[in-house]
Structures are given as structure tokens and as C-alpha cells.
Amino acid sequence: MNYRRILLKLSGESLGGSSGTGLDSEALDVRVNDIVEAHDMGFEIGIVPGGGNIFRGIHAGDSGVDRMVGDQMGMLATVMNALAIQNRLTVRGIESEIWSSIPIGSFVRPFNAREVREYLRKKHVGIFPGGTGNPYFTTDTAAALRALEISADVLLKGTRVDGVYTADPEKNKNARLYRTISFDTVLEQKLAVMDLTAITLCRENDLPVVVFNQNRAGSMKRVLMGEDEGTTVRMNETTA
């Protein structure tokens, strides 16, 4: 796999540890260690963090909050996660910058694809919170959009299972893992890889997606080394 520039979609829940909520110091260190390993291997890295460990806009109604307002709160949650990731990277000696899709002020910059691409060429890490900057769009869609804008070679999607299965492996013990699968198969079978908008964006622009278990130690490194890890979603190929 000849990847040079990667976009990592990092779920908010993965930063919350076993509970999936708040910021868990150990979980944060594990995620950052994966990023540092990739950086040390020479990859150019962009990161889109989710915010579900702090607030999920799609569940806003449960709190009596309007969905649009809930999504805006979720966007702010991703900025909080971005700051936590940046802080850990700084401690590890890795230079990084935050480019947000929503205007914040002095401590993050507004997203600018041209500036980001130039920054990544210097082997610094770019972090892109704020989702797309619009309600009703997920951070998966933001990850697909940012990956295309920064000319990433691949979108890495971390999950809590080993990849894409023929069925939900947490409910069906006979589910089989796909090593490669086509975008068309994902769409036809309605497999839960990413939301429909994100998958369609990747398909239309021939951007491969690798789904891997972010909780398995060293899994991201193995993906980048081309080992048999996770599931690669790309054009016109399906192997279970």
C-alpha cells in the first residue's frame, strides 16, 4: 500500500475509555501513541475527531435540546477533543495545528485546505474539528470531506471491531470479516461502515477507506505497513 498522506477519523467514544464518555487519560495516550507511531514512520497525518464522548447531537432530543442546537454543541465537543489531542502531541514533541470548520478565536485556525496541505508536507500533524461546520452532517462525512480536500491517499476509520463483517459480529457469531469490499457492496447491503453521505463521497472520488479495530494495540501501524489488518473498502472488489 503506497499511502503517504492519511486522514484518521478518530471517534470521540474512543477517547472516553471503557465508558466512552468524558476524556480518559489512558485512552487518550493510546490514541496519541498510534498517531506518533505513524508520524515516526514518515506519514503525513490529518485527524478528524468526533465528539460523542462529550455530546452527541443526534441524541440531543433526549436532553430536550433541538437537533440543530445539539449538533452545534457536538461541533464544540470535537474542538475540545482536538485540544486534548494537540496537548498530548506537544508533550510527545510532535508539532501540530488545529484548523476548525467553525470560527472560534485565537487558539484554533479556520480551515484552509491550501495551508493545511503545505503544513502536512512538513510532516506536522493537522487536526480538523468542527465537523463540516453544518448541522445534520456527521463527523464521518467531515472526515471524507477533509480527506478529499487535503488530497489524502486513504481514510482510516477506527472502530471497536476488527473491520467490516457480513453481519454485526456483536450480534451474530457466524459473521465473516471482509478483507476487501467494494463501495457498491457496502451500499447495497447497507453495511455500517460510515454514513451514506460519507461512503458516497469516498466512492465518487475513488478514495479508499480502511476500517480497523482502534482498540487493538498496534493495529493502525499494521494497516500502514500493509499487513492483513482490518477491511479495505475500495472500488470493485469484495472478498470475505
Image: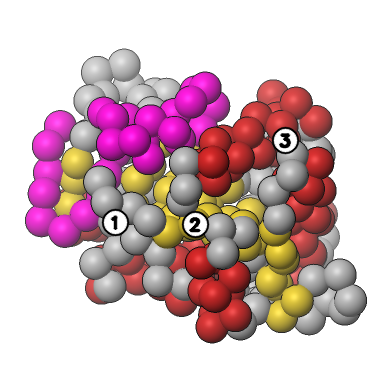
Q: Which residues are magenta?
A: 213-240
**Quick check: 102 above or below 198?**
below
Task: Please tell me the numbered disc located at residue 81.
Answer: none
Left or right of residue 71, residue 84 in this image:
right
Q: At x 28% / y 30%, what residue is drawn? A: 227
Pointers 2 and 1 in contact (CB under 8 A)? no
Disc 1 is placed on an element classified as loop
**Residue 81 seen:** no
Q: Nearer the viewer, mark 3 or mark 2?
A: 2
Task: Please tell me the numbered disc located at residue 44.
Answer: 2
Looking at the picture, how far across and down is residue 106, in whole percent?
A: 89, 76
Give the residue pinned by disc 3: 28
Is residue 226 covered in magenta? yes
Count neighbours of disc 1 (C-alpha within 10 A) and say few if under 14, some if 14 to 19, many if 20 or more: many
The type of residue carrying mark 2 is Glu
**Quick check: 238 above or below 108?**
above
